[in-house]
Image (cartoon, rainbow, N blue to C red):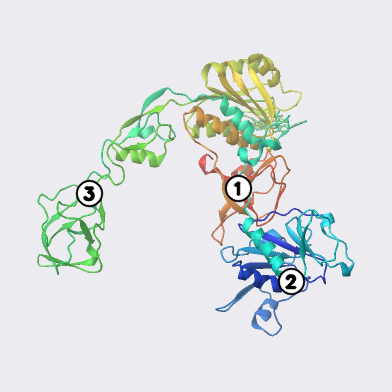
Amino acid sequence: MSNSFKNPLSIPVLGICAYSGTGKTTLLRQLIPSLAEQGIRVAVVKHAHHDFDVDVPGKDSYEVRKAGAKQVLVASHVRWALMTEAPCEGDPQLTHLLSQIEVDKVDMVLVEGFKKLTLPKIELHRAAHGQPFIYQNDNNILAIACCQDTLLPQEIQRLDLNNVQQICDFVTSYVNNWQAPALKLPLTPACGCDVADSKSLSVCQGVEKILSYVEPITAAEPVALDELNARVLATDAVSPVNVPQHTNSAMDGYAFALADPMPERFTLVGEVMAGYQYAGKIQAGQAVKIMTGAPVPEGADTVQPREMAHEEQGYVRFDGPISLGQHVRQAGEDIAKGAVALNANQRLGPAEQGLLASLGFAELAVIRRPKIAIFSTGDEVCEPGQALKPSCIYDSNRFTVKSMAKKLGCDVIDLGIIEDSEAALAAALLKGAAQADVIISSGGVSVGDADYIKTVLEQVGQINFWRINMRPGRPLAFGQIDNKLFFGLPGNPVAVMVSFLQFVQPALRKLAGESQWQNRLIPAISDVALRSRKGRTEFTRGIYQLGDDGRLHVKTTGAQGSGMLSSMVKGNCLIVIDEHDDAIEVGAQVYIQPFADLL
Ligand SMILES: Nc1nc2c(c(=O)[nH]1)N[C@H]1C(S)=C(S)[C@@H](COP(=O)(O)OP(=O)(O)OC[C@H]3O[C@@H](n4cnc5c(N)ncnc54)[C@H](O)[C@@H]3O)O[C@H]1N2
Ligand code: MOO
């Protein structure tokens, strides 16, 4: 039986497998120097029996470990070793062990043992030992090193067990031809939408289909600078001025013309404050006292900060090295007059507002806000603030959806809770279509008896009911009512938010005129083992933080029920488990979508 293995490193990993006594260590001792001659620096991971020890009783490192230290790092100027007490059931995890290797110090890893893992291997075989071949039950064997008289099928690459140079050439060629697998990001066509079967769609197929129906709004309106947050620019913002307007000083100090050789001291001829200008021209050997932001006078090209200068009786002397142009901000160095400061179709936030203010804009043309009509369905759903009826729940979906839509700069029309009746639903859908660009409902898209929405939707528009290969958020209805977009999100509160983030968000951004937007994916190290199912993208709520190793680490928020909104509150990201993965081991890389963009 073989266990799946994914190389977490950016260098090749090659196994050497054999029954014990075949001569693995003897071969490694000869192979490693031969590889070194080829310029290949080798790391070795060796599986050992359970009570192995690298230390000797009596040594300080041994004694402190025996005293209970979970890790002991012993180091000299030539070598260091980290000993970690890590009792675990079964074999140690090779992926985790490999992540300890410093890939900038070696070119490949040879792995001895771990023969059940699906890593590429060379099998060592000695017929005289009477053991069976490993390759017959392991299709990861690249070559067999055996004695000359051993019979092997033609199709197997044969190596001479007693010819180290030949084995070295094979390994060298393997290393030289090895290519790191192409980066497969989840949620992109490259991730292999092929996994989806004919009855269901992968997440990227769903997004692609939805976006093909979205026509960006082009209508624009002038909006005051103060109100531009979350709006999308309708036209390029061309700078009417240079920023900064004048070449000015970045320090409180002295402005002068750099000379070679430098005079011993400069004659102080004046002082210039921010907001004022020095009227004259600076001559060789002269300096003016200058404040941060004040225009550098004509003739001066360099500023020395006050801390590096000594002023006495009308003169100034400078300490330390001085370079031409230091502490001088050139006119237009941030944004030049006539340059495009912000492109059309860019979403504006605080930084963009500040930049537009710095150019003197008081208002700008932006795309009109998309109008979104939102309602919840279900007789069990109650309005917050009212007494909760027996067997009912408060409506949370309308509030998460409204809030996310508002953050995306949409105008929200709240159609309330619609009872489970065909007439009420039809009326709500038609009202939404008459007033809004997009209608979003939640609930009633699965297969429950009271899911009237399906029948009604078939009457009022062209709606598709999809099964998306994802969790949470499997059922999704999408279509058009009177040329307005309709999203029927699933009822479960976490499923609503995840479906909104994956499907509604890109649609609303495109509708609002925003171009080139993509959900952000950031690599992080998983501190926990994660499970999924091949063919399904899993959106696990996670908490990411910077680890002590300076890398981003993530763990789950705990229980992941699709009705548990607390998981969205505790979390700061979704951990996206690709549809090709069914298991993520501790220490493996995963991708996360931080909530920072929207939640
Ligand atoms: N036999 C099957 N049952 C279910 C399937 C399935 O494939 N076969 N899919 C499950 C999945 S996955 C989801 S998600 C839900 C989606 O069902 P609906 O969209 O029809 O939603 P409802 O049944 O109306 O509600 C599901 C759940 O969510 C609660 N809910 C509904 N609206 C709100 C709201 N506004 N605020 C808070 N909570 C709400 C509702 O009470 C239910 O508990 O179907 C599964 N079942
Ligand atoms: O969409 Mo459902 O259970 O996947 O929440």
| Mark 2 crowd level (few <14, some 14–19, many ≥20, 10 Å Cα) | some
In the rendered image, which quarter contains the N terminus? bottom right
User: First in sequence: mark 2 or mark 1?
Assistant: 2
Image position, residue 377 (x, y; %): 65, 25
User: First in sequence: mark 3 or mark 1?
Assistant: 1
Mark 2 belongs to which amino acid?
A: Leu
Q: Which residue is at the front of the view, 6 or 237?
A: 6
Up/down of 397 relative to 9, above or below: above
Mark 3 belongs to which amino acid?
A: Thr
Separation of disc 2 and disc 3 at Cα? 70 Å
Separation of disc 3 and disc 1 at Cα? 46 Å
Residue 203, can we see it? Answer: yes
Q: Residue at x 75, y 26 (%)?
A: 448
Q: SS class of the residue under badge 3?
A: loop
| Mark 1 crowd level (few <14, some 14–19, many ≥20, 10 Å Cα) | few
Q: Residue at x 66, y 18 (%)?
A: 457
Residue 27 image label: 2
From the viewer's perspective, is the residue at label 2 or at label 3 nearer? 2
Query: Mark 1 highlights which residue?
Result: 183
Image position, residue 167 (x, y; %): 71, 65
